[in-house]
Image (cartoon, helix red, strand yellow):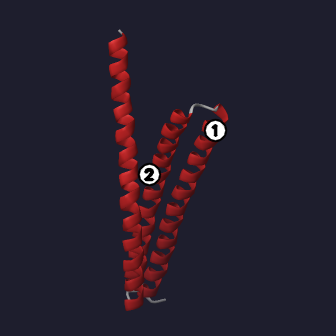
Amino acid sequence: MDIQVRLFEILYVVVVGINLVGIIVVFWGFVVAAMAFARMKLHRHSVVFFLKEANEIRAVLGTYILFGLEFMIAGDIIHTFVKPNQEDLIVLGSIVAIRTVISYFLGKEVEDARREREGEQVLNKQMVLKES
């Protein structure tokens, strides 16, 4: 068997593995977020608490999605290395562009949720200090 053909077969298996890891990460994030959402709904808190908790759950899910997308992009890059024709390069460019845009906006959302959580912690500390 030609060594180049064997190398491409190995790289194809690696690409499938990397994409599978990305899918598992996204699915696991969905499971974690769904369980957190179910727990939150069972406790019947106020609307304000619900909104804060829902934003935190969205941030957690967004983080998992971002992490999974990074694996999938890596898999796409390696796949294109294996079969570098013009059509694959165009498809890769489109996929990377779409995933990059999604990653950018998810990253902003996660960062906003983190800042909001930190702001709430500062306010809570200030309220405790005023009460003391």
Query: Are the residues tagged 2 and 1 within 8 Å (C-beta)?
Result: no
Residue at the location (58% across, 41% down)? 36
Say what amino acid the circle numbered 2 marks. Answer: Thr
Q: Is residue 100 toward the left or the right of residue 49 in the image?
A: left
Q: Position of residue 127 (x, y in %)?
A: 36, 19
Q: Position of residue 38 (x, y in %)?
A: 64, 41
Residue at the location (60% across, 43% down)? 37
Residue that carries the numbered disc 2 in the rendered image: 63
Residue at the location (49% across, 89% down)? 1
The numbered mark, 2 or 1, whose residue comes first in the sequence reads 1
Q: Quadrant of the C terminus?
A: top left
Q: Residues within 10 Å of mark 1 (few under 14, many from 20)?
A: few
Q: Is residue 108 toward the left or the right of residue 19 in the image?
A: left
Q: Position of residue 34 (x, y in %)?
A: 61, 47
How many callouts does the rendering have? 2
96, above or below 54, in the image: below
Residue that carries the numbered disc 1 in the rendered image: 41
